[in-house]
Amino acid sequence: MRHFLQFRDFSADEFEHLFKRTRVIKERFKNYVAYQPLVDRMLAMVFEKSSTRTRVSFEAGMFQLGGASIVLNMGETQLGRGEPIEDVARVVSRMVDIVMIRTYEQAIIERFAAHSRVPVINGLTNEYHPCQVLADIYTFVEHRGPIAGRTVAWIGDSNNMCNTWLQAATLLGFKLNVASPAGYELEPGRVAGVDRTHLELFGDPVAACRGADLVTTDVWTSMGWEDETDARKDAFTAFTVDAEMMAAARKEALFMHCLPAHRGEEVSAEVLDGPQSVVWDEAENRLHAQKALMEYLLLGRVET
């Protein structure tokens, strides 16, 4: 049994398999060909953090694969009344086939997985967002081919997305340029031991974009840090991804954003709605990539 709690839980070979399966599953979806290998399987979705794309993509994806899903909001369950997460894992995993959790602390999902009898997927924590980066890299592959040897520019907060992109860079063999304002840089412990073939840090976002194949960003204030909103707006003023930054990137560079986006803050409307933006493909690919992920966790390698 395997879990997907952070990006490095899988090997490069496994991700190559997932990208191939995502393409096959998406093609079937686009051609209205039913593919339901998970009939009679049940997905439990546990939410502490609110969600739009995560819930819709997992719920629709499990239905399209022939299974069913149930939603557990922590405030409406015994989890919200102090029941140990270990006990919840022991019970829930006896009743369903796979679990997705979207919560604040990575430790919560790690504890749940340690006591679960079924695969557990990280739908987002404060530290990592592996399903999103899985979909993002597939989107790049779909548009531009293999990501190995390419350069990805991350502009903004060194948040869960940035942490996950860093794991992906070291695992899949591309370079990550990170530009963050002072006080919001990657934690030293995450940078230690990562060589410059995979990571370079910048104070200047335009310099970070220079020669990049992909420019990506996220909101300036993630869920849980709302009390810092005003301070972050001041700190990140020079880190809006705009036409100047995209012009510094390669001519064929793509722009991505995991959404929701705030036009005029972390990205200009000109870029988000412009010809280099693939954010809507990126959002849709959450559905297809997660279907491939659930297939793999429940059935292993499928080649048909």
Image: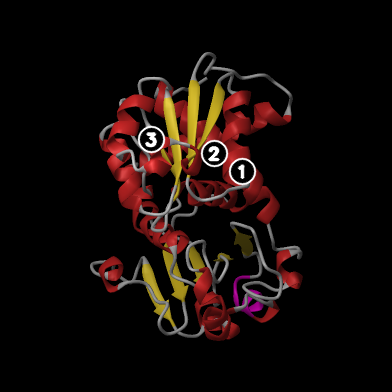
Above or below: residue 103 compared with residue 150: above
Give the magenta-colored segment's residue range: 245-250
Measured Cα–Cα span from mark 3 to mark 2: 16 Å
**Can I make out residue 2 in this image?**
no
The residue type indicated by label 3 comes to Val
Instruction: Provide residue 296's location: percent of width, then percent of height.
Output: 43, 28
Above or below: residue 166 compared with residue 286: below
Q: Secondary structure at mark 2?
A: helix
The residue type indicated by label 2 comes to Ala
Q: Are the residues flagged by discs 2 and 1 in contact, CB closer than 8 Å?
A: yes
Instruction: Provide residue 43's location: percent of width, then percent of height.
Output: 49, 27
Instruction: Provide residue 84's location: percent of width, then percent of height.
Output: 29, 39
Q: Are the residues flagged by discs 3 and 2 in contact, CB closer than 8 Å?
A: no
Which residue matches tag 1?
A: 285
Which residue matches tag 2?
A: 289
The residue that appears at 53% across and 79% down in the rendered structure is 232
Say which of marks 3 and 2 sits in front.
3
- Left or right: residue 65 versus residue 84 is right
Q: Nearer the viewer, residue 79 or 231?
A: 79
Q: Tell me, yes or no, whether the highlighted magenta stretch contains residue 246.
A: yes
Q: Secondary structure at mark 3?
A: strand
Say which of marks 1 and 3 sits in front.
3
Which residue matches tag 3?
A: 120
- Left or right: residue 155 versus residue 81 is right
Q: Residues within 10 Å of mark 1 (few under 14, many from 20)?
A: many
The residue that appears at 68% across and 56% down in the rendered structure is 278
Instruction: Provide residue 111's location: percent of width, then percent of height.
Output: 28, 42
Q: Tell me, yes or no, whether the highlighted magenta stretch contains residue 284.
A: no
Report the disc number at residue 49.
Answer: none
